[in-house]
Amino acid sequence: MMECDNPEHDIEKAMKCDCHGCNAIIDDIRDMVNQKHYSKKPDFAICIPEMEHIEQFIHCSKCMKELPDNISPQEWARHEVGWTIWGFQVWCVRHNVNVLHVDFQGAKHPSSMERLPETDEEKRNKAKRTAKEHMDWRKDNR
């Protein structure tokens, strides 16, 4: 099996893709057409990649105006992100303002809340941070 080249779940691409998720989409559509039963929807969620695929970052415009020269927007950002009764919202904690609020208008969209397993490097970095925090705590509490 190959890696999915169809993150937008395009039906024409799904026909050419060999991954499990795209095959499931095609099978579901084939079943719906053959059975003339349209209540079952294809499970697009199984095709959503867990790796970062962000193409455009979202930032608070007020934060960007105040961005210090020596700090990246990623380091400067202070966002809370979460689900609302309407959809999905990005909130600026620093300015207590809405950055983005997406209204799904009652539609359900596939999503992935999965996380890729930690790499060995991430585990080593985490252990180093924990050890440093412990040493700093011991130094401060002598």
Image (cartoon, helix red, strand yellow):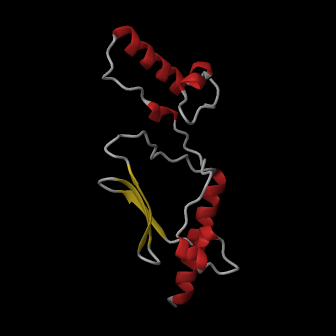
Query: Disc count in the image?
Result: 0
Q: Which of 6 and 123 is in front in this view?
A: 6
Residue 131 falls in image quadrant: bottom right
| 86 sits left or right of 12 in the view | left
Q: Position of residue 87 (x, y in %)?
A: 36, 52
Residue at position x 54%, y 43% from top?
50
Q: In which quarter of the image is residue 74?
A: bottom right
Q: Measuring from the top left, give residue 11's x and y in whole percent.
A: 53, 24
> Residue 135: horizontal and vertical position, in percent?
58, 79
Residue at image position (57%, 19%) is 15
Image quadrant in which the N terminus is located: top right
Q: Residue at x 45, y 78 (%)?
A: 95
Residue 5 vs 62, above or below: the answer is above
Q: Is residue 101 left or right of residue 117?
A: left
Is 87 rendered above or below residue 64?
A: above
Q: Residue at x 62, y 78 (%)?
A: 67
Q: Which residue lies furthest to the right in this view?
A: 70
**In the image as oriented, which residue stretches furthest toward the bottom?**
142
- 93 lies left or right of 64: left
How far across and how far down the image is residue 122, in percent?
62, 56
